[in-house]
Image: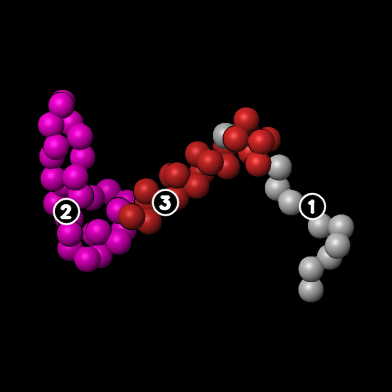
Amino acid sequence: MVKVNESKPDIDRIFEDGRLIDQALVESVKQALLVHKRADNPVAEWRDGKVVLIQPEDIAV
């Protein structure tokens, strides 16, 4: 049941602070890496101006 007095998140404050956004990005990357590793798929990484494929066994999660 939704209470009438429940407040919505203040999106401007969330963007100004940035910590929740940073946490969401870190968690999203971890999940994406885990999905690739479990599916035995490499991931692409940008290194020294080039795209490098990281093999599933070398993906650190």
Q: Which residue is mark 3?
A: 28
Q: Answer above or below: position of 52 versus 47.
A: below
Which type of secondary structure does the marked residue at label 1 adopt?
A: loop
Mark 1, residue position = 7
* Mark 3 or mark 1, whichever is nearer to me: 1
Q: Which numbered disc, 3 or 1, marks the residue that appears first in the sequence?
A: 1
Residue 54 picture location, percent across and down: 16, 46
- Residue 58 visible, this orientation: no
**Disc 3 residue type (three-letter):** Ser
Range covered by the magenta-colored residues? 33-61
The residue to which callout 2 is attached is: 42
For the residue labelled by badge 2, is the local secondary structure a helix, a strand or a loop?
loop
Judged from this view, the residue extending furthest toward the right is 5
- CA gap, disc 3 and disc 2: 17 Å
Residue 14: in magenta span: no
Q: Is residue 61 above or below residue 47?
A: below
Q: CA distance from mark 3 to mark 1?
A: 26 Å
Q: Amino acid at mark 1?
A: Ser
Q: Is residue 1 left or right of residue 30?
A: right
Residue sitting at 43 percent across and 44 percent down? 26
Of mark 2 and mark 1, the one earlier in the sequence is 1
User: Residue 50: which quarter of the image?
Assistant: top left
Select label 2 or label 1 by which is in front: 1
Q: Answer with left or right where residue 43 lies relative to residue 10.
A: left
- Mark 2–mark 1 Cα distance, whole angstroms, equals 42 Å
Residue in the picture at 44% in, 50% down: 27
Q: Residue at x 30, y 53 (%)?
A: 33
Q: Residue at x 62, y 30 (%)?
A: 16
Residue 18 x, y percent position in the rendering: 57, 34
Q: Is residue 8 shown to the viewer in this render?
A: yes
Q: What type is the residue that disc 2 sits on?
A: Pro
Is 22 placed above or below 56 here?
A: above
